[in-house]
Image (cartoon, rainbow, N blue to C red):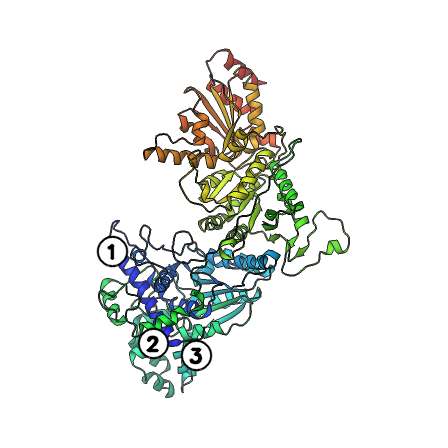
Amino acid sequence: MPVDSTHLKIIEQRLLWLSHWMIHHANHVRPKVDGIKVGGHQASSASMVSIMTALYFTALRPEDRVAVKPHASPIFHAMQYLMGNQTREKMENFRGFCGVQSYPSRTKDIDDVDFSTGSVGLGVAFTSFASIIQDYIKAKSWGADVRMGRMVALVGDAELDEGNIYEALQEGWKNDLRNTWWIIDYNRHSLDGIVREGLFERIEKIFDAFGWDVVRVKHGVYQRAAFEEPGGEKLRDWIDGCPNQEYSALTFMGGAVWRKRLMDDLGDQGDVSALIDRRSDEELARLMENLGGNCVETMAETFAAIDHDRPTCFLAYTVKGWGTPIAGHKDNHGGLMNKAQFMAWQAHMGVEEGMEWEPMATVDNPAALQDFLARVPFFVRGTRRYRDDKVAVPAIAIDTSRETSTQMAFGKILDDLSKGDSDLAARIVTTSPDVTGTTNLGPWVNRRKLFARSQQADAFSKHRIPSTAKWDFVPEGQHIELGIAEMNLMLLLGAAGLSHSIFGKRLIPIGTVYDPFVARGLDALNYACYQDARFILVGTPSGVTLAPEGGAHQSVGTPLIGMSQDGLASFEPAFADELAVIMEWAFDYIQRDGEGDPCERTWLRDETGGSVYLRLTTNPVEQPGKRGDEDFRQGTIDGAYWLRKPGPNCDVVIAYQGAVAPEAIKAAGLIGEVRRDIGVLAVTSADRLNAGWTAAQRARSRGNKAAQSHIEAKMSGLPSHCKIITVIDGHPATLSWLGSVGGHQTIPMGVEHFGQTGTIGDLYRHHGIDAAAIVEKVNGLTQGRGVGGEFLASLVDN
């Protein structure tokens, strides 16, 4: 859109006012309930207002997407309010219950948030992966009609301390990144201090090394005009050489102090003194605060000058708190204007009392401004949340006639899909942080190839060197290979998992990672789930079952991550047929977007859908044979089924999850020689069992006395004296709560400490999760019960 500096300046001032009033209202006008500061980052918003005005009202198109820096959330909401996409009620309730969010949120704000932000740095890196996904879709026959947009991040300069940004830079270079803008608000203030001198010269070199164009936006129109005056060159040199901290302090103190300092440093030089003397204190302060990032004209011209698709970093110099009484103060990050300051500033802004929420207050010609706003390209199509049809899921089956591991079964299921021509197979995109082969994605990749925007030759194939990995990089490829950075994996899964909403084309993303390193990407995983991205995460191999690798590669706490992570349904199957059932369900579940009450069969909100986490293992185990009954299939999805139903006089139940199934089954066989009614509960998802149980309890507390969860139904027939032994290759807390369902004494078994190298048998014995340890626990529970207890003791001894 052509630069209309008059209207842009009006919008800039309107956004500055509305954002700051919203924060002030929340902290000083709205009744206090908790007695604590609400906050809102006035100064961090002010430094972004010119940049965001120029970006949204001149540069962006509807197909562009933006990650707004967290602390500029008030500017974003004020902008949407001005455009009619946000309500006054929610603005008045800023940072209150059901009000506009502290940080832009796709899932909790009603205005058109492209990417949630809040965990600093992640929104920045996310845009580069969204751009890669855009290229991926565009290269496919079914995605050729996608309109290419720029993925834009508005970045606080302190966010560049986050290491994940530099991991993303590397991945972007490897994947020929394009159509990405990062606009850095270089206000030189963080929460605790001021950015070190010379830091950004080094950061610029990093961007340059990874193929980015770097555009410095240092001086606004007033400064550039002054530089053309006699003596202006000397003033420019002084500005460019002034330390960050000094410049900020002078800005806070104002025009008279600027004059004294400049005259002390540059006075008695004739033309420079005259340049300074021609301006009043107010005009001099305006000149010195007119850095490039605080000049809406300069920013609009800078954006308009970019005529290529290379990744571009804009380093926009700004004053934190620009245009307000707290501008430049080193404490202004979390600081607020007090009531007296704000009253004076309100008079300065020309806003009459009672007109504070009026979008067009202070606008001389509202009709002309409304006409301008109606023509802004970015907003002309309204909100930009797209949809795509669900992809049909074919039946998933697997051969269970021989020993296999869940990891091997996962690879076989994908391999079978790769041989077919289903719509599901066409929409699957796989990715992995340099562990593609060792997580059993190899067969899928060999058939479906790796993605690159242009074909890349495989030297090993060219020279006919035998290799199991046929790494063909082609535009139609369906695997995106990543370097060893789990944060990048989670961010890419998040971007791919939002493709139906951002680009209108549905993907079925599947990412594999060594299970212990799920924790390395946990911040980004949480961020992806918070955005309601849809994907399947496969953690494999897992637990101390990966015995020879030692403690560094053996996961302990990941089952608890799966249970606690919102938006992520976690499963840990023991057998291949369980995995087949789960994956068929998961392919459908990640495409759901429904609403409504929880299903009264399980009390799970399955219609809303979500992402899925599979915890798999490499240990081949004997399979239970072909099973297809509905209790097995539905129980596998709901979280548990009876592998061995308890009898009417059951006094021991063994409940297991995952790789320890053979140990639990063996122990049950031994114990069953004297206790015929023993039950064996196969838990496939402690996460879903627990979620359904707690939801049913809430329903009962609200008056629905008939509410009963899946696990409550499964355990309802157990006698009160029955004891429960839980066992898992993971933290015992994962299943320890099962006894609370019906008030049964429970002995949890699992892994609480780092492992070491050895055989599986060695480590199972060491951690006490083998069959003998289970029998020993049962023996301990049955001491003094006569012959049965003595017989169990003899089993342990033998």
**Mark 3 touching mark 2, by CB under 8 A?**
no
The quarter in which the C terminus is drawn is: top right
Give the residue displayed 29% in from the left and 81% down from the top.
Answer: 280
Q: Which is more N-terminal, label 2 or label 1?
A: 1
Image spot of residue 403 (x, y percent): 65, 32
**Amino acid on which the number 3 mark rests in the picture:** Asp
Q: Give the numbered dot on residue 286.
A: 2
Give the residue displayed 40% in from the left and 30% down from the top.
Answer: 708
**Counting other residues with Cα less than 10 Å from the Cα at mark 1, is it few (<14), some (14-19), or many (20 or more)?**
few
In screen coordinates, is 330 left or right of 417?
Answer: left
The secondary element bearing badge 3 is classed as helix
Residue depth check, mark 1 versus mark 3: number of the one nearer the observer: 1
Q: Which is more N-terminal, label 2 or label 3?
A: 3
**Residue occupied by mark 3:** 237
Q: Which is more N-terminal, label 3 or label 1?
A: 1
Residue depth check, mark 3 versus mark 2: number of the one nearer the observer: 2
The secondary element bearing badge 2 is classed as helix
**Residue occupied by mark 1:** 30
**Mark 1 touching mark 3, by CB under 8 A?**
no
In screen coordinates, is 247 left or right of 569?
Answer: left
* Mark 1 → mark 3, Cα distance in angstroms: 47 Å
**Amino acid on which the number 2 mark rests in the picture:** Arg
